[in-house]
Amino acid sequence: MRTTDLDDQKQEAAFYYQNNSGFYGVEAAQQNGGTSVRLLERGSVVLLHRHLLISRWLNDSFGVVEVPNAKGVPVYVNNQVP
């Protein structure tokens, strides 16, 4: 949040949230009696072998790991569990 009290009074507020499915945000501003609101969303949707996957933004490459009949199997990326 921020506000100015100079010649042009302006108030702004923003909220951002990120999880394993994407990045989301809301921004709002008010100045000279006008109000603007902006909604942000950035993520990816992948359809692979009849599976629909939702993830953060994919800009280079990605891997999908499927282990039948097993839960909680750790998958390492650069020697770390993401």
Image (spheres, helix red, strand yellow):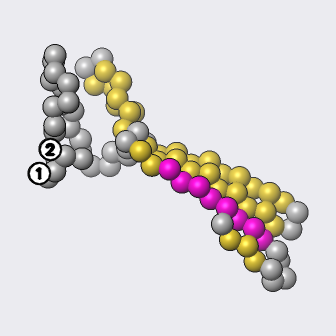
Q: Is residue 71 visible?
A: yes
- Toward which corner of the image does residue 66 lie, by quadrant? top left
Q: Is residue 47 above or below residue 31?
A: above
* Type of amino acid under label 2: Tyr
Viewer-closest of 71 and 31: 71
| Residue 44 location (% of width, % of height) | 40, 39
- Magenta span covers which residues? 10-17
- Toward which corner of the image does residue 52 lie, by quadrant? top left
Viewer-closest of 77 and 44: 77
What residue is pinned by disc 2? 76
- Name the image quarter holding the N terminus: bottom right
Task: Using a 10 Å C-alpha cutoff, classify the residue at mark 1 as few (fewer than 14 neighbours), some (14 to 19) or many (20 or more).
Answer: few
Asked which secondary structure carries label 2, the reply is: loop
| Residue 77 location (% of width, % of height) | 17, 47
What residue is pinned by disc 1? 79
Tags 2 and 1 in contact by the CB under 8 Å rule?
Answer: yes
- Toward which corner of the image does residue 12 lie, by quadrant? bottom right
Task: Using a 10 Å C-alpha cutoff, classify the residue at mark 2 as few (fewer than 14 neighbours), some (14 to 19) or many (20 or more).
Answer: few
Q: Residue at x 41, y 45 (%)?
A: 19
